Amino acid sequence: MVSLAAQEWMAEGVAQGKAEGEALGLKRALRRLLTARFGLLPDSVAARIDALPGEALEATLDRALTASDLAAVFEDPVSH
C-alpha cells in the first residue's frame, strides 16, 4: 500500500512529466514550422526556442504562423 504522500508525489511527477513532454513537442513543432517557412534556422534562433518557457510556447507558435520574418516571431506583442 502506498501512502497518501507518496501518491501525491507520484501524481506531481506525472503532471510535471506531461508538461515537459508537451513543451518539447511544441518546441519541435515550432522548429519545424520556422524551418519550413524561413529555411535553416540560425543557432541563435534554436537557442531562443530552447530557452522559451512553457507558457510562451503557444503564443510564439501562433506568431510563427503569420510572421513576415524570424524577428517578428519573437517580438513581444505587449510592447507593440
Image: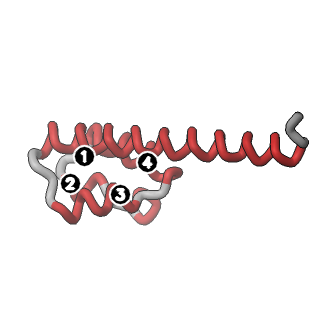
Residue 4: where, in percent of width, then height? 90, 42
Asked which secondary structure carries label 2, the reply is: helix
Q: CA distance from mark 4 to mark 1?
A: 15 Å
Q: Which residue is mark 4?
A: 57
Q: Are marks 1 and 2 in contact (CB under 8 Å)?
A: yes
Q: Which mark is residue 67?
A: 1
How many other residues sit within 10 Å of disc 1, few (<14), some (14-19) or many (≥20)?
Answer: some
Disc with the residue nearer the chain's start (3 vs 4):
3
Q: Which mark is residue 39?
A: none
Residue 7: where, in percent of width, then height? 81, 40
Instruction: Please name the residue shown 32% across and 41% down the image.
Output: 28
Q: CA distance from mark 3 to mark 2?
A: 15 Å
How many other residues sit within 10 Å of disc 4, few (<14), some (14-19) or many (≥20)?
Answer: many
Q: Which residue is mark 3?
A: 50
> In front of the other: label 1 or label 3?
3
Q: CA distance from mark 4 to mark 2?
A: 15 Å
Amino acid, disc 1 = Ala
Is 74 located above or below residue 15 in the figure?
below
Asked which secondary structure carries label 1, the reply is: loop
Q: Which residue is mark 2?
A: 70
Asked which secondary structure carries label 4, the reply is: helix
